[in-house]
């Protein structure tokens, strides 16, 4: 018997995600009326890739897309392990408006860390957008400009979120529980 996990109940379905992504794009547009300068979108790898791909295609802005790798749940861990980052901030952020897109606000370490890095890299403004925010004090304590859905403090997979790099392709957000293989 090996320790595996189980994908469970749907927390946010694909239709609600689609609708909310359009609303978030409108919110972001109101916060950043498109001017001459492009908006620099920083996509946090890998969990935010699917959300960001949908969200930026709903934005009317000129967009410069960049990626950063920040990992607080490496491999098979389901509790935050601190931050490991590879690569540095892209030069394009200097003197520009920046929007960070992440999948989930959990301990808030990722967003706090990136906000500080982007400010020291010379970004003009830094705003943040997450698809999900967990119902826990640490997550609520970190300011975030655009939040897709508030969800229970449970481990979830799908629509970009993974367990051990699996399940990112699921169209809905679902609970995931660790358990012995059946
Ligand atoms: P924070 O820095 O603790 O807010 O962690 C955010 C990062 O942890 C996210 O970008 C995810 O990669 C990962 N993470 C947090 N909760 C979950 C979850 O429920 N499922 C999958 N990944 C998660
Ligand atoms: Mg992540």
Image: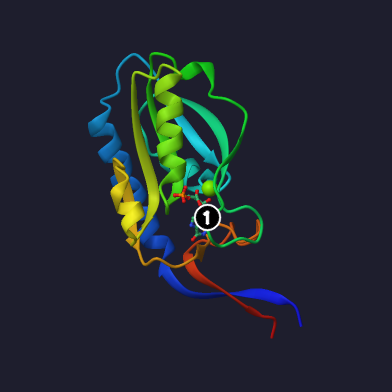
Rendered location of residue 114, percent (x, y): 45, 34
Q: Does the residue labelled 1 lie within 8 Å of ligand 1?
A: yes
Say if 7 sits above or below 180 in the image.
Answer: above
Specify the farthest residue to the bottom: 182
Say if 153 sits above or below 58 in the image.
Answer: below
Determine the image quadrant of residue 29: top left
Residue at x 49% of width, y 65% of height: 155
Residue at x 69% of width, y 86% of height: 182
Can I make out residue 39 in this image? Answer: no
Q: Which secondary structure, mark 1?
A: loop
Specify the farthest residue to the right: 1
Could you tell me which quadrant the N terminus lies in?
A: bottom right
> Does 131 sit left or right of 176 as displayed?
left
Task: Indicate the colouring scheme.
Answer: rainbow
Q: Nearer the viewer, residue 79 or 59?
A: 79
Rendered location of residue 42, percent (x, y): 48, 32
Rendered location of residue 77, percent (x, y): 61, 60
The residue at which mark 1 appears reads as 80
Specify the farthest residue to the left: 30
Determine the image quadrant of residue 85: top right
10 Å crowding of disc 1: few (<14), some (14-19), many (20+): few
Q: Nearer the viewer, residue 18 or 121?
A: 121
Residue at x 26% of width, y 39% of height: 27
Can I make out residue 29 in this image? Answer: yes
Say if 105 sits above or below 144 in the image.
Answer: below
Rendered location of residue 54, percent (x, y): 46, 44
Q: Nearer the viewer, residue 80 or 55?
A: 80
């Amino acid at each position: 018997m090996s320790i595996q996990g189980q994908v469970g109940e749907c927390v946010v379905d694909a239709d609600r995600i689609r609708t909310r992504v359009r609303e978030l794009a409108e919110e972001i547009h109101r916060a950043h009326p498109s001017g001459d300068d492009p908006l620099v979108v920083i996509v946090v790898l890998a969990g935010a890739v699917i959300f960001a791909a949908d969200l930026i295609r709903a934005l009317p802005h000129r967009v410069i897309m960049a990626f950063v790798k920040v990992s607080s749940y490496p491999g098979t861990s389901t509790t935050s392990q601190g931050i490991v980052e590879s690569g540095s901030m892209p030069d394009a952020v200097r003197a520009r408006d920046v929007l960070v897109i992440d999948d989930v606000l959990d301990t808030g370490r990722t967003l706090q860390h990136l906000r500080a890095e982007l400010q020291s890299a010379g970004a003009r403004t830094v705003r943040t957008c997450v698809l999900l925010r967990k119902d826990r004090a640490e997550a609520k304590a970190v300011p975030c400009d655009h939040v897709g859905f508030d969800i229970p403090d449970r481990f979830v997979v799908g629509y970009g979120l993974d367990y051990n790099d699996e399940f990112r392709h699921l169209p809905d957000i679902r609970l995931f529980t660790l358990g012995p293989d059946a």
